[in-house]
Image (tube, helix red, strand yellow):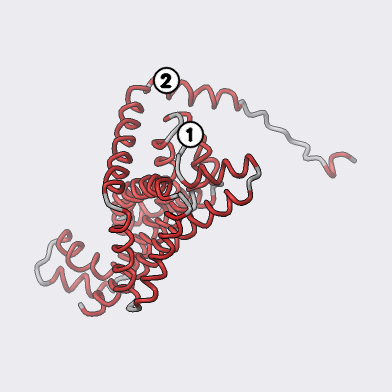
Amino acid sequence: MDWLYNFPLKIAIDLESIDNAVKGFSVKYDGFFSIIKKGLSSFVSSINDVLNFIPWFVLIIFVVIVTWRISGKVRNGLLYGLMLLLIGAVGLWTLMIETLSIIIASVIIALLLGFPIGILASASDRFDRIIRPILDTMQTMPVFVYLIPAMMLFGLGKPPAVIATTVYAIVPMIRLTNHGIRQIDKEVVEASLAFGSTKMQSLIKVQIPQALPTIMTGVNQTLMMAMSMVVTTSMIGASGLGMEVLIAVNRVEMGRGLISGIAVVIIAIILDRITQGLIQSSEVGSDGE
């Protein structure tokens, strides 16, 4: 009666050969991956240097002004400024900058790749059908799975963290760019073409501006998904607030983990409010047009 409770069929999968294939691939193209690793490392370091060059009080004032203008309420701007002051007061400002540099680098790459892919998906039904199951798989894949190939190909540190974060966070940018352009009334596009616009001109001057609120929502979601990888990527050597949380978990230091976790939440809230404000501005601009 064992067959009632134990699955009778077992397929032997040679997992070791898969590991060896990936290792062999990484060794064969080590020069190529080294170039990418150096480029990503320089990119993240440049962003980190720029953020460190800005005085802490200037960055706080900038956040206060931006959030005030977006929300229309002075107290909101002051609240977010006080949140940043709290991060600095507990000694996590440098780690916050390191985290931001990785997040900004990952989001920039995700936007540069996701935006054109979304445009291609909106222009071709065949390409959309091909890429949709891939995006579904990427979106449902456990986040830890992304760390394995990134670590095997790029080693430890910030470059594999950027790669893993980019791959994980790129999905909403592709989906919402595709959706935003597809939901535009066909009559509007046909009218632009009838007045002599080329397909490229119609895309740039009509379709993208009309789809901008949806595209900006994709930017917001990409940013939030990148933030959700902060602690996860610390497992492959990404420094910053995520590493502080990981160390706190390993040492069972509740206070250290709580403070670092709150700092991550504060950054996520501020970035979310800023991008939400940009979404509202794009909706107003789109309606005005």
**Picture layout, residue 199 above or below residue 1:** below
Total number of numbered discs in the rendering: 2
In which image quadrant can residue 4 be found?
top right
Looking at the rendering, in which quadrant would you find the C terminus? bottom left
How far across and how far down the image is residue 143, in percent?
A: 53, 46
The Cα atoms of the two marked residues, 2 and 1, are separated by 13 Å
How far across and how far down the image is residue 166, in percent?
A: 40, 46
Q: Secondary structure at mark 2?
A: helix
How far across and how far down the image is residue 141, in percent?
A: 54, 47
Residue type, label 1: Pro
Q: Nearer the viewer, residue 72 or 173?
A: 72
Q: Nearer the viewer, residue 65 or 205?
A: 65
For residue 149, which numbered disc appears in the image?
A: 1
Q: Secondary structure at mark 1?
A: helix
Residue at x 54% of width, y 51% of height: 140
Q: Which residue is mark 2?
A: 27
Residue type, label 2: Val
Residue at x 37% of width, y 22% of height: 30
